[in-house]
Amino acid sequence: MNFHMIILLITFFVTIITALIIIPILKKFKVGQIERDDGPESHLKKQGTPTMGGIIIMISMIIGIAITYFYCSLNGQIQTGRRLIPILCLTIGFGIIGFIDDFKKLVLKNTKGLKPSYKMLGLLIISVVYVLFLIKGFNIGTQTYIPILKTYITMPVWVYIPFAIIVILATTNAVNLTDGIDGLSSSVSTIIITCLTIIGISRNVPEMVLFGSVVTGGTLGFLMFNLHPAKVFMGDTGSLLLGGVISAMALYLKMPLLLLVISLIPVIETLSVILQVAYYKKTGKRIFKMAPLHHHFELSGWKESKVVIVFSLVTLVLCLLGVVII
């Protein structure tokens, strides 16, 4: 069995063990979900469900990458192991910003949480550091793959840097908006990350294969507790973390444009919010019963489990398409 499959399984079981430890702690300190009064009525019964569970994925990722780094060092792949660290730092950094937001809202009972300007500033600083490290530290350059055309273009540095930063910020925001139903964001993200890992295998990028395997194991383990009815929610800690993972992997593989295909569900979720707000400001009316889009389907009579299954299947088909067009 290849090591990337072994580390996936190890991280999966580490996540389950971590969840069994963390969830009771979150319950003890009453770190519970706060539901919107104007949200779907069915969500009111979720009030108090432990949230901020993204720390479970975060801890399992750190353990998984540590084991992977040790394995690479023993097998003469020290360069591969070293390349995992900056990618881990980016994603954990995003998770920490989400954690601070969750902590202020759920533990300190500050309903506003982290100020949006502070949150965006933090995400921006981490994004800039990662993009500069991609160019200077990893010497990956500014090449970007164009799907369908199956060719690379080399962007000027002054174009690539803001472009890459926008990709990271847009992706994390999109995954964050997709988190609103039991198991939705974690399911969709797992499929996208698995797709990027498979691309890493096909393009012979070992560090991305190992990193993707660790995260996939973590998200699959988390899903055991996050599927309906959820025993824990990921909160901003998890959604920002996973958004960072997806964008970091896509940029490292030089395939950020592919996210428009394989991450179409988070993209549509984001667009539904933008359209809803813009249309309401202009006309005083709503396009959707509620945004993001998954809530519209809920209010249209779909059960949560159906929304998750349909959105996940659509993402799976789009990921298969993404693999084909590259």
Image (cartoon, grey):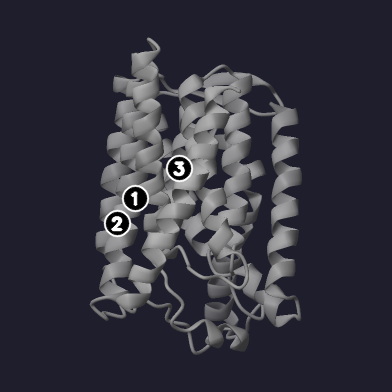
Say which of 259 and 275 sits in front: 259
**CA–CA distance in space, label 3 to label 2:** 14 Å
Residue 180 falls in image quadrant: bottom right
Locate residue 185, reporting x and y percent: 56, 58
Disc 1 target residue: 94
Residue 210 visible: yes
- Label 2: few (<14), some or many (≥20) within 10 Å? many
**CA–CA distance in space, label 3 to label 1:** 9 Å
Disc 2 target residue: 97
The amino acid at mark 2 is Ile
Locate residue 227, reporting x and y percent: 61, 64
* 113 up-or-down from 154: above or below: below
The amino acid at mark 3 is Val
- Label 3: few (<14), some or many (≥20) within 10 Å? many
User: Residue 104 bears which disc, if any?
Assistant: none
Q: Residue at x 26, y 54 (%)?
A: 121
Q: Earlier in the sequence, mark 3 or mark 2?
A: 2
Q: Earlier in the sequence, mark 3 or mark 1?
A: 1
Q: Secondary structure at mark 1?
A: helix
Residue 115 falls in image quadrant: bottom left
Disc 3 target residue: 245
Locate residue 78, reporting x and y percent: 34, 15
Is mark 2 in CB contact (under 8 Å) with mark 1?
Answer: yes
- Residue that extends furthest to the top in the rendered view of this protein: 76
The reply, left or right, for residue 244 in relation to residue 283 is: left
The amino acid at mark 1 is Phe
Q: Secondary structure at mark 2?
A: helix
